[in-house]
Amino acid sequence: MLDRKFVRRGLFLVFLILFLDIMGIAIIMPVLPTYLRELTGADVGEAAIDGGWLLLVYAAMQFLFAPLIGNLSDRFGRRPILLASVLTFAIDNLICALATSYWMLFIGRVLAGISGASIGTASAYIADISDDSNRAKNFGLIGIAIGTGFAFGPVIGGFLGELGPRVPFYGAAALSFFNFIAGLFLLPETLDRANKRRFEWWRANPLGALKQMRNYPGIGWIGLVFFLYWVANAVYLAVWSFVSSYRYGWSEGQIGLSLGIYGVSGVLVTALVLPRVVTRFGERRTAALGLVFCALGMAGYAAAWQGWMVYAVIVATALESLVEPPLRSIASAHVPPSVQGELQGALTSISSITKIVGPLIFTQIFGYFTGPAAAYSFSGAPYALAGCLIVACLAVFLLRVRPLSRKASQDGVSKPPQA
């Protein structure tokens, strides 16, 4: 059993890394419409589509390279992969801050996508130091880090955006460099040598990693649930700022405030509600409850024709933050410790596909329903579609997904070769 002080230190540091990474992403969201319009001269609808293409190239690179990153972390450990990811994210933001054309933004997005988002390796890191009694709670730290990052990031980004649309990108780069220095000196390794395995190229690609996951019963259905859930949730990153600017006439500061309150609500639910609900109802029922509130939230955002209604929906449907921690815990229990990095790499590939599909769909829908060719102007259309996807996700989850203890997963699969 791992030392409790070691576990607490590891959890704190991986939380810090995720928090600063997410804040670095969220800090630029309030200024993205203004920045893209300034860089391209496009109107808000065309700028939303341009933003969708940026998300697509990032997600495409992540889809291609996430399994490689996951397999490398199973071979060499979590620490070096996390540090490389954080450093590359800093370089990406610096390039975006210095960009003089729309195409320069693609260079930064390609680099960030190749490095792999830190959340995949961070999830494997948490799985390394967790067991059946605390896994869902520990995975809740990911939700807390994301929520806290989204709480502070947009507010800071909105404030910095008043100084100029490029300033938040410099802020994000500075946060990432600090993140890298802190991790370099303080982050411990969690993957034991006994659980390291050989690196195999045939598994280090999207198709190989996804095919390998078929060896673990039930993972395929969990992957489909994640796919539908992540596609739907891509609506927030894709069009929240654009809908708020178009529908309510919000400034960068107001957009940042709304995202900050959304983030705070997620943090409170994950930190205070999740541990109690999981203990009482179990992982499966907790995830199902979160999906119900997620569907209600999408419907609420679609129907919110006045700005104050957005805040009412955020508060009323905050329990949507219950979804991902128990889902990740259920998935983690289906594979042995030596495959956690590969699992998280496969999940990151699935997430990357949704970041390609989701923003393209939602920005195109927003652009159409706010453009001159639309038979009916409805800027809430992206949220309505996202709500339908969540309903489908809930149906698959209830009909096909069952929890599995880590011991059962180890008993039911063969162990991979060791390093």
Image (spheres, rainbow, N blue to C red):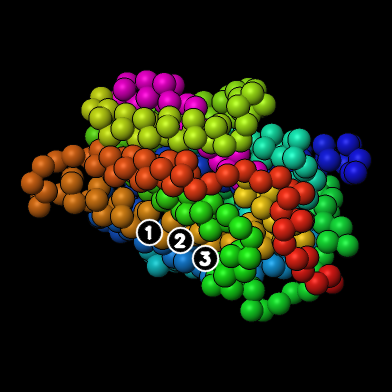
Please give the name of the residue rendered at 49% of the width and 48% of the height, measured from the top-left corner: 400
User: Based on the displayed image, in which of its 4 quarters is residue 272 positioned?
Assistant: top right
Q: In the image, which disc is placed on residue 357?
A: 1
Q: Nearer the viewer, residue 396 or 41?
A: 396
Q: Nearer the viewer, residue 404 or 136?
A: 404
Amino acid on which disc 3 is placed: Phe
Verify CB contact (< 8 Å) between mark 2 and mark 1.
Answer: yes
Please give the name of the residue rendered at 69% of the width and 67% of the height, measured from the top-left corner: 71
Image quarter (top left, top right, bottom left or bottom right) of the N terminus: top right
Q: Which residues are magenta?
A: 307-329
Q: In the image, which disc is placed on residue 158?
A: none
Residue 321, percent from left and from top: 52, 33
User: Alpha-carbon neighbours of circle 1 within 10 Å: few (<14), some, or many (≥20)?
Assistant: many
Residue 31 seen: no
Report helix, strand or loop for mark 2. Answer: helix
Tell me: 343 left or right of 160. Answer: right
Amino acid on which disc 1 is placed: Val
Residue picked out by circle 2 = 353
Verify CB contact (< 8 Å) between mark 2 and mark 3.
Answer: yes
Say whether residue 85 is magenta.
no
Residue picked out by circle 3 = 63
